[in-house]
Image: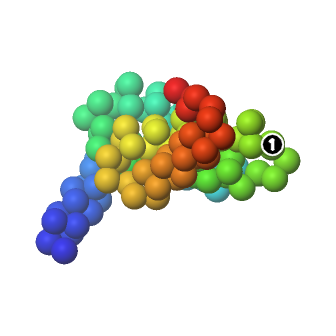
């Protein structure tokens, strides 16, 4: 509990140091379904504001998780179209947030599907 509080406090402090418009704009893009645009914005911010890396990486994890979830929920995409995209997005989440259980579970599920079909897991 204390550890979680310290992590949240650190993230909150980092968000205050970052220009809040970048994160707010990325969150609005994500909410509007513009996941790749939000990710591009945040990746650019990460390059130009390395001192704000903690906050930007948290926002990138969130945007990639939303991309993976939206891809998996898209009924217009066939499995062969959605699984590789979602898998890459969930893997990106873990690059930015190694403790994200939802992304880890979704990766395991998608990889399990490939393995059950005897097909190679996309990298």
Would residue 38 appear left or right of 6 to someone viewing this image?
A: right
Outermost residue on the right side: it is: 76
Residue 53 visible (yes or no)? yes
Label 1 residue SS: loop
Q: How many marks?
A: 1
**Residue 36, image x and y in percent?**
62, 36
Would residue 57 appear left or right of 105 to someone viewing this image?
A: left
**Residue 82, image x and y in percent?**
70, 41
**Residue 75, image x and y in percent?**
81, 53
Residue 26 visible (yes or no)? no
Which residue is at 38% across, 26% downward? 48
**Mark 1 lies on residue:** 78
Which residue is at 30% across, 38% downward? 53
Outermost residue on the left side: it is: 2
Image position of 100 with respect to 89: above or below: below
Name the image quarter holding the N terminus.
bottom left
Q: Nearer the viewer, residue 48 or 114?
A: 114
**Residue 8, image x and y in percent?**
26, 63
Which residue is at 55% across, 47% downward? 112
Image position of 74 with respect to 57: above or below: below
Q: Quadrant of residue 37?
A: top right
Would residue 39 appear left or right of 58 to someone viewing this image?
A: right
Q: Nearer the viewer, residue 123 or 51?
A: 123
Image position of 9 with respect to 29: above or below: below
Crowding around mark 1 (Cα neighbors within 10 Å: few <14, some 14 to 19, many 20+) is: few
Q: How is the image coloured?
A: rainbow
Image position of 90 with respect to 47: above or below: below
Which residue is at 35% across, 47% downward? 97
């Amino acid at each position: 509990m204390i550890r979680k509080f310290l992590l949240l406090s650190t993230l909150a402090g980092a968000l205050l140091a970052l220009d809040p418009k970048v994160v707010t704009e990325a969150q609005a893009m994500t909410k509007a379904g513009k996941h790749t645009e939000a990710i591009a914005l945040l990746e650019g911010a990460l390059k130009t504001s390395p001192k704000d890396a903690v906050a930007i990486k948290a926002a990138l994890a969130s945007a990639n998780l939303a991309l993976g979830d939206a891809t998996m929920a898209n009924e217009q995409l066939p499995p062969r179209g959605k699984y590789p995209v979602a898998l890459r997005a969930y893997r990106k989440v873990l690059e930015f947030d190694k403790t994200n259980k939802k992304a880890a579970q979704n990766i395991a599920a998608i990889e399990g599907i490939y393995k059950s079909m005897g097909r190679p897991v996309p990298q």
